[in-house]
Amino acid sequence: MNSIKKILITRQGRKFYARNLNEDVHTQYGYVKKEELKKAIEGSLLKSNTNMEFFVFNPYFIDLYRKIKRDAQIIPLKDVGLIIAETGINKSSKVLDAGSGSGALACFLAGIAKEVVTYEIREDFIEITKSNIEFLNLKNIKIKNKDIYKEIDDKNIDVIILDLPEPWNAIENCAKALNPGGFIVSYSPSIPQVADFVNALRKNERFVYIKSVEITEREWEVEERKIRPKSKGLGHSGFLSFARKVQ
Ligand code: SAH
């Protein structure tokens, strides 16, 4: 995958991506000449041939993250946010996630954690995850082609996130891999999965159940005094359940 060299953003917030500085950037608002792009200083304003204005800057992690390949359904950012906030993942954390899917969650967490290990059973998804890791230039992720229901051969993990159909089948293996005080998190789209996961945790003496949560993100339109919730966009993603390993 070509890396993204520059971000061009309109005053309305529409973003365009320059992958090759030796080519003009074509948009539906006309094109920006490569010569102007090359000599532009960070944050400066460029104009297209149709006089549309674009600010230009180097991509941030989040600009690149939003452009990764997505094949499996990835966890939305609102849910990534809560995982990080509840578990306090930070630069000293050792994190494990399964399955990798497109590697979206693993990549986001690698941006803030010390190291991330991601388990995946399907080779096609491993390939997508690899290309996303490369695209984001992350060096602290390991991919393992393993079934997490069968075995986890990693130890001293601080946080494990399960995004797969039967998370309760991984609980025993997670108990062995987690540090005392470490977190197990499950992300599931439907309630029977939450029930089976939480009921299994409650029966397990090695875990203390914390909570299950659904995050609803409602975006608002703000224009002068016309301020109201956007009419579109409230969909369902999944439920998050959190517990801590105690022994
Ligand atoms: N969180 C990922 C999406 C995960 S989709 C992201 O943000 O991109 C669920 C993935 O789990 C699928 O790719 C599936 O192949 C994988 N999976 C299912 N069962 C598994 C198991 N037992 N061990 C490892 N991976 C598994």
Image (cartoon, rainbow, N blue to C red):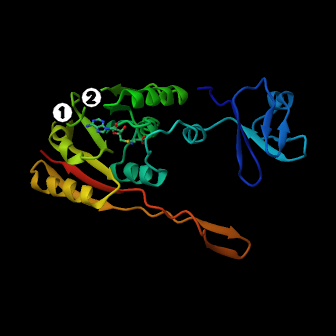
Rate crowding at label 1 as few (under 14), some (14 to 19) or many (20 or more) other CA atoms within 10 Å. few
Q: Which residue is mark 2?
A: 146
**Image quarter hosting the C terminus:** top left
Q: Which residue appears at 20% of the width and 35% of the height? A: 177
Query: Is label 1's Cβ within 8 Å of ligand 1?
Result: yes
Query: Is label 2's Cβ within 8 Å of ligand 1?
Result: yes
Q: Residue furthest bottom?
A: 225
Looking at the image, residue 84 sits to the left or right of residue 203; the answer is right
| Percent position of residue 71, x then y | 47, 38
- Label drawn at residue 150: 1
Q: Secondary structure at mark 2?
A: loop
Instruction: Determine whether 25 is above or below 204 in the image.
Output: above
Q: Which residue appears at 33% of the width and 32% of the height? A: 120
Q: Quadrant of residue 117?
A: top left
**Image quarter hosting the N terminus:** top right
Q: CA distance from mark 2 to mark 1?
A: 8 Å
Amino acid type at image mark 1: Lys
| Percent position of residue 100, x then y | 37, 36
Q: Which residue appears at 21% of the width and 39% of the height? A: 178
Cβ atoms under marks 2 and 1 closer than 8 Å:
yes
